[in-house]
Image (cartoon, coloured by chain):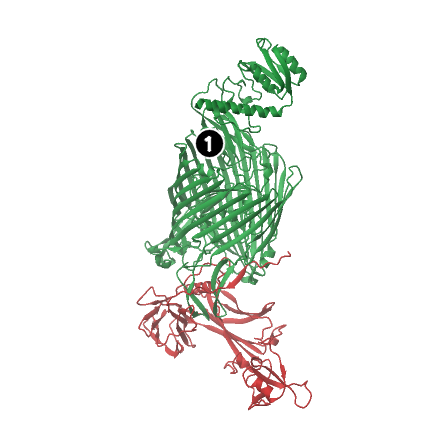
């Protein structure tokens, strides 16, 4: 075939601005029975064209209520977060979340069953052509778990592309005393809904592909860690998450179903038609963390976080130095070893290439060995 | 005065016919005959010309000739000799001259002579048909200028009516010509041939000129004297000069004469000149250019006819029901264009013999094989190749036609977006039709059809589906007035999904539907005013709604099988075409259908008055094998009336209702290969649709331009919609996920069509709405608060242009343009953060629209030379699909990626697509 065709095509689409003054309450969180704290995040939905990001719901009063009339208040942490320390709930009874917002409206979730997750057997990985596939493995011999949801946080230690050995202070160059921008850590959380069901399998055994680290990624250059959290859901909760996944992530293929607004299990006490977004689940979450270095993985040749980093050799005279280094665009790296003569030239690079705090944080996480 | 004009006309006409005869002969008589007797004249004539005379000398001894002729044809001379006498003559083979007294000698045997031992001499006065049939000069027509006497001849024509019936066939191939108009000049009465080429018309006894107009055939005019009921088989000659690029409309007035509304007929020649995506003629793509027919998107051959869903169309291929009429994501239709003869789409007035779907009937007929010679054709395109062979098995009695197609479409998938990189797809189909004419009264037909599709989209999940159909038919002519068919068939549709990504969950998902049909249809030409059709039939369904089975030893999948479903659908019908006056006719039909849902089955019971949800389930009830679980039944009305205000202007009105007992479950916009079908059961009621329509039809320019305006209003009941997030596959209690929906559809369709001439094609404009409403209070869930909302294929404005210009006999260009309003979509109105990402809130269902659709396609057809006698005829089709390269959106969607929401517009064909096809006929 000598004619190159691009048959189908996908383009960005900007929808028409739809004037809708919606500010629906969004409730996200999990009633955790165990040593870990329980945390809820209350926000409001916002218009499609609103530039504002998160709109936290402040000054609400939250309580976890048991069918046995027990009640456990949550404390407002700020930014819409509400939490309480580890709870010791009764597995035999159901619990719900009660919200009273600052405008006086009350919201209740349905009473939900406590689902205790079986322990994570292992976090395993397989090196394949596309990269490093990480799996979460678990099983439940009772076969009562069946519906799983996962979350993960990836954290990795990395170095700046160049070590800045010099610093430009008071219009002059000197050897850098302390470099706290060469080694950093970066943490990202899962953004996709991760669900697994063993309902159609004879054994309640799950081997879930959690995440794929792309081949030779800079994420595994010094040390990489992932913590996987495993929740067990009721069938109803699984449907909620699965619908949310279908509507927001698995859409746009040729045979995708039409999107729809799914409803959770939280309702306004005064107006049953009011849309409240979110699903309250309860139970015991399990988590496990592993660490990996590039030496653990066959054929792992890692790259850098920024492909365009290179050194620029500049004249070592006050005007040139000031031009490059007085602003924030460049950082000095070293003297140019190839330049001869009296005053060696200076190698500089883009700030992002020598300052890892542009990408991550130089504070070592508490769990890092 | 009037008599004089009439005489003048007759005289001038006689002069015209004689003079044309004169030009043809070269055997001229010259001489001065003064008082010769006839014997002497004969001796002279036999000496100077090749003529030989046969006569009774004794009878002619009174003839005395006084003539002076110079180089005149014998006929003219004899005319003068016998003028004013009782003598007649006849010339056979330009050689033998018979002279008789009082009786005309017919030079050819009358049709049906050997079955009808009547003397072949007509009584005096009945022979010169031309004098009796018309007050206009008779047009000279080729070999058809002979007199046919029908029925048992009597000396005097008796008063009353008679029936002429017979079969019209192609003189070259022996194939029957369907849809040919047969009518009498004088009375205007007439009819059309059915799909077997059979016709039956009722006329006043006496002389007639019968006109026959067949699609792609030369028009025929036959002089007929009708004495009583009889048979007239006609072989029509093809329009050879035009080969394939020109459509000669046989149906010049069919649109005005037929009583039904909303009927679209297309023959394969028209279909072949419409440009399609890969250059291969595509039946369903062309149907989409007709007014009132829509589709949800480019990758879909699901048809939406006048607001009906894709599963509400009965798609028949030689009486076999085709459940999935598409290949390869809907880019191809599943019918080999070389085998298809024509299609008929019934949008409104659906004949009573059809039933079982609530919106439309698409009847696709394949050709009968050539009964005289072996021939075939083949085509090579960028994606597919096809071949067709046909020929006699027993000459003039039995013929076959075999067609097959296959694909090499994988390269196209390579051109899809990166996400489909590792995708594979292929398909094939095969069809075989055999027809056997045992004798004049019995004909047998057999059709076999199979199609297979297999594809995977970028992973190890392989989808495959296919149709299997067999049908056998016996057509029997009981008498000239009554004929009937008996049809038996087996139809199957199946699909299978195999997934082997993770060995522990490797599975095979299967679905299939089987139906066995048996039906009889009769046509009874009761009188000139009444044509009755009646019949009955049954369909036995066997569905396997789903099986989910492990594959491989490592698989932990628990076998899960949704219990099979059985049902029996039966119907009987009768309808009458009643010609009240030549201008006013009506077609009234009644169909009564009866549906039994049969065991073995376990029915879930739910608390009455509460939503049908698993939480409200109260128990189950078992039914044994072949026990009737429940029954649905009801009448279906089919009524239409036509009034011809003038010869070229008629109005029609109609009402029809339909019932549908089998439903496709689909919550995707377009028809997906994994859509399953479900039979009506105690919880899922049959769908009902009824429609009133009205139309105005006007032909212009001597019936070469047809114009029409039709309006309709349609109601849909118990249309299926689904709860949010419903799972349709492997659902053991599908009733809990179904929402019964009501709908209404209405619109206006305007069409201007020209099917003859150098420039032909059609322009249509449709304005239509399709609105749905889900407000069942017991369902526990409504859509858009129970208000009407537009359906997925509600596209109010739609303009289609299909044009073909024949530059010369070997070169023609075609242009196709489509405009339509964008289809409705559900757009987001807000955003929120949940589950690690920004997500969107959706507004009311289908309250916004994707951008409008516009596409033009262009193609050129280049034929090789047109010599009739050569081994092969070649042609090329070269063209461009989506000439303007417009990115017509198939869908618009919002997806959460890496924590943010992005909106995308997906176009199936994002550029102009060139294509080339090589066709060969042998």
Seen in the picture, residue B232 relative to B717 is either above or below; the reply is above
A303 displayed left or right of B152: right
Image quarter (top left, top right, bottom left or bottom right) of the N terminus of chain B? top left
Quadrant of res B71: top right
A259 displayed left or right of A268: right
Front-lying residue, B300 or A52? A52
Front-lying residue, B197 or B804? B804
Q: Position of residue B229 (x, y in %)?
A: 47, 25
Color used for chain B? green
Quadrant of res B114: top right
Front-lying residue, B394 or B131? B131
Image quarter (top left, top right, bottom left or bottom right) of the C terminus of chain B? top right
Which residue does the numbered mark 1 point to in the structure image? Answer: B190
Color used for chain A? red
Chain for numbered disc 1: B
Q: Secondary structure at mark 1?
A: strand
A82 displayed left or right of B323: left
């Amino acid at each position: 075939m000598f004619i190159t065709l691009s048959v189908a095509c996908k383009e960005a689409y900007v929808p028409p601005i739809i004037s809708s003054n919606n500010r629906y309450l969004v409730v996200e969180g999990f009633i955790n029975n165990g040593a870990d704290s329980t945390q809820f995040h209350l926000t409001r939905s916002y218009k499609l064209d609103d530039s504002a990001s998160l709109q936290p719901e402040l000054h609400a009063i939250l309580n976890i209520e048991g069918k046995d009339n027990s009640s456990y208040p949550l404390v407002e942490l700020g930014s819409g977060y509400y939490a309480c320390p580890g709870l010791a709930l009764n597995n035999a009874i159901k619990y719900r979340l009660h919200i009273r917002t600052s405008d006086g409206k009350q919201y209740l979730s349905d009473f939900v069953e406590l689902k205790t997750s079986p322990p994570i057997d292992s976090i395993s990985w397989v090196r394949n052509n596309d990269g490093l596939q990480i799996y979460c493995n678990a099983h439940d011999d009772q076969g009562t778990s069946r519906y799983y949801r996962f979350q993960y946080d990836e954290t990795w230690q990395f170095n700046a592309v160049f070590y800045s050995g010099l610093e430009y202070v008071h219009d002059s160059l000197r050897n850098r005393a302390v470099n706290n921008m060469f080694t950093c850590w970066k943490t990202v959380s899962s953004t996709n809904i991760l669900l697994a069901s063993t309902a159609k399998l004879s054994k309640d055994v799950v081997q879930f592909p959690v995440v794929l680290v792309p081949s030779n990624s800079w994420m595994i250059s010094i040390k990489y860690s992932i913590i996987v959290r495993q929740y067990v859901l009721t069938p109803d909760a699984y449907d909620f998450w699965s619908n949310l996944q279908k509507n927001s992530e698995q859409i746009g293929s040729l045979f995708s179903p039409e999107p729809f607004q799914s409803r959770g299990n939280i309702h306004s006490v005064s107006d049953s038609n009011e849309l409240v977004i979110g699903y309250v689940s309860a139970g015991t979450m399990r988590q496990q963390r592993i660490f990996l270095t590039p030496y653990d993985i066959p054929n792992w040749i890692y790259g850098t976080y920024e492909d365009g980093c290179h050194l620029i050799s500049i004249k070592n005279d006050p005007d040139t130095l000031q031009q490059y280094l007085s602003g924030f665009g460049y950082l000095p790296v070293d003297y140019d070893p190839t330049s001869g003569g009296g005053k060696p030239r200076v190698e500089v690079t883009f700030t992002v290439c020598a300052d890892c705090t542009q990408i991550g944080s130089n504070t070592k996480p508490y769990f890092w060995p | 005065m009037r008599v004089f004009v009439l005489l003048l006309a007759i005289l001038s006409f006689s002069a015209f016919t004689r003079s044309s005869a004169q030009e043809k002969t070269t055997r001229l008589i010259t001489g001065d005959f003064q008082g010769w007797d006839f014997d002497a004249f004969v001796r002279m004539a036999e000496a100077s010309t090749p003529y030989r005379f046969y006569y009774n000398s004794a009878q002619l001894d009174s003839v005395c000739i006084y003539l002076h002729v110079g180089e005149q044809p014998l006929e003219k001379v004899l005319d003068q000799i016998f003028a004013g006498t009782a003598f007649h003559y006849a010339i056979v083979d330009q050689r033998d001259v018979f002279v008789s007294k009082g009786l005309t000698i017919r030079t050819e045997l009358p049709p049906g002579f050997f079955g009808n031992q009547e003397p072949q001499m007509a009584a005096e006065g009945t022979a010169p048909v031309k004098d009796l049939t018309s007050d206009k000069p008779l047009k000279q027509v080729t070999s058809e200028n002979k007199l046919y006497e029908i029925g048992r001849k009597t000396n005097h024509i008796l008063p009353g009516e008679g029936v002429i019936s017979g079969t019209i066939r192609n003189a070259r191939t022996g194939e029957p010509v369907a849809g040919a108009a047969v009518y009498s000049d004088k009375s205007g009465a007439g009819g059309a041939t059915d799909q077997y080429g059979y016709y039956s018309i009722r006329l006043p006894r006496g002389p007639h000129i019968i006109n026959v107009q067949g699609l792609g055939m030369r028009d025929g005019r036959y002089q007929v004297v009708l004495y009583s009921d009889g048979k007239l088989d006609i072989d029509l000659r093809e329009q050879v000069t035009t080969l394939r690029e020109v459509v000669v409309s046989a149906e010049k007035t069919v649109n005005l004469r037929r009583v039904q509304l909303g009927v679209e007929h297309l023959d394969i020649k028209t279909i072949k000149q419409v440009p399609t995506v890969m250059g291969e003629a595509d039946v369903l793509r062309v149907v989409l250019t007709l007014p009132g027919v829509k589709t949800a998107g480019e990758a879909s051959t699901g048809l939406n006819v006048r607001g009906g869903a894709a599963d509400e169309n009965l798609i028949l291929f030689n009486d076999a029901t085709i459940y999935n009429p598409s290949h390869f994501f809907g880019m191809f239709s599943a019918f080999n264009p070389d085998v298809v003869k024509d299609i008929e789409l019934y949008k409104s007035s659906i004949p009573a013999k059809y039933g079982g779907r609530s919106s439309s009937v698409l009847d696709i007929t394949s050709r009968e094989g050539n009964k005289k010679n072996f021939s075939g054709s083949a085509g090579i395109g960028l994606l597919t190749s096809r071949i067709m062979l046909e020929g006699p098995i027993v000459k003039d009695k039995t013929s076959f036609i075999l067609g097959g197609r296959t694909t090499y479409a994988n390269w196209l998938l390579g051109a899809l977006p990166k996400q489909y990189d590792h995708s594979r797809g292929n398909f094939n189909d095969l069809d075989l039709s055999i027809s056997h004419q045992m004798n004049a009264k019995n004909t047998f037909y057999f059709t076999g059809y199979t199609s297979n599709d297999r594809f995977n989209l970028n992973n190890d999940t392989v989808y495959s589906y296919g149709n299997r159909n067999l049908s056998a038919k016996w057509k029997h002519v009981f008498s000239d007035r009554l004929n009937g068919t008996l049809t038996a068939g087996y139809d199957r549709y199946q699909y299978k999904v195999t997934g082997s990504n993770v060995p522990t969950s490797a599975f095979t998902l299967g679905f299939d539907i089987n139906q066995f049909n048996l039906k009889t249809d009769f046509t009874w030409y009761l009188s000139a005013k009444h044509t009755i059709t009646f019949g009955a039939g049954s369909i036995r369904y066997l569905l396997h709604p789903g099986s989910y089975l492990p594959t491989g030893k490592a698989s932990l999948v628990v076998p899960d099988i949704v219990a099979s479903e059985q049902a029996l659908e039966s119907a009987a019908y009768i309808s009458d075409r009643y010609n009240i006056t030549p201008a006013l006719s009506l077609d009234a039909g009644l169909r009564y259908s009866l549906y039994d849902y049969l065991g073995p089955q376990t029915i879930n019971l739910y608390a009455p008055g509460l939503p049908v949800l698993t939480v409200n389930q109260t128990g189950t009830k078992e039914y044994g094998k072949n026990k009737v679980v429940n029954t649905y039944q009801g009448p279906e009305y089919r009524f239409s009336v036509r009034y011809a205000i003038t010869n070229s202007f008629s109005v029609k009105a109609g009402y029809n209702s339909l019932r549908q007992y089998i439903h496709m479950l689909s919550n995707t916009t377009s028809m997906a290969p994994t859509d399953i079908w479900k039979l009506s059961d105690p919880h899922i009621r049959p769908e009902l649709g009824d429609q009133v329509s009205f139309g105005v039809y006007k032909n212009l320019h001597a019936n070469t331009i047809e114009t029409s305006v039709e309006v309709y209003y349609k109601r849909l009941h118990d249309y299926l919609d689904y709860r949010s997030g419903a799972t349709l596959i492997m659902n053991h209690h599908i009733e809990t996920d179904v929402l019964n929906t009501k709908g209404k559809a209405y619109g206006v369709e305007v069409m201007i069509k020209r099917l003859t001439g150098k420039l032909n094609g059609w322009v249509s404009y449709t304005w239509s709405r399709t609105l749905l409403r889900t407000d069942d209070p017991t369902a526990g869930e409504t859509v858009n608060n129970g208000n009407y909302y537009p359906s997925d294929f509600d596209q109010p404005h739609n303009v289609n242009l299909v044009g073909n210009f024949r530059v010369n006999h070997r070169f023609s260009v075609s242009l196709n343009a489509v405009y339509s309003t964008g289809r409705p979509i559900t757009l987001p109105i807000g955003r929120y953060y949940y589950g690690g990402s920004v997500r969107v809130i959706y507004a009311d269902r289908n309250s916004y629209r994707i951008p409008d659709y516009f596409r033009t396609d262009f193609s050129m057809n280049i034929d090789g030379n047109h010599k009739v006698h050569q081994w092969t005829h070649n042609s090329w089709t070269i063209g461009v699909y989506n000439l303007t390269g417009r990115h017509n959106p198939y869908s618009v969607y919002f997806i959460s990626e890496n924590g943010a929401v992005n909106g995308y517009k997906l176009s199936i064909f994002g550029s102009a697509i060139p294509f080339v096809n090589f066709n060969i006929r042998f």
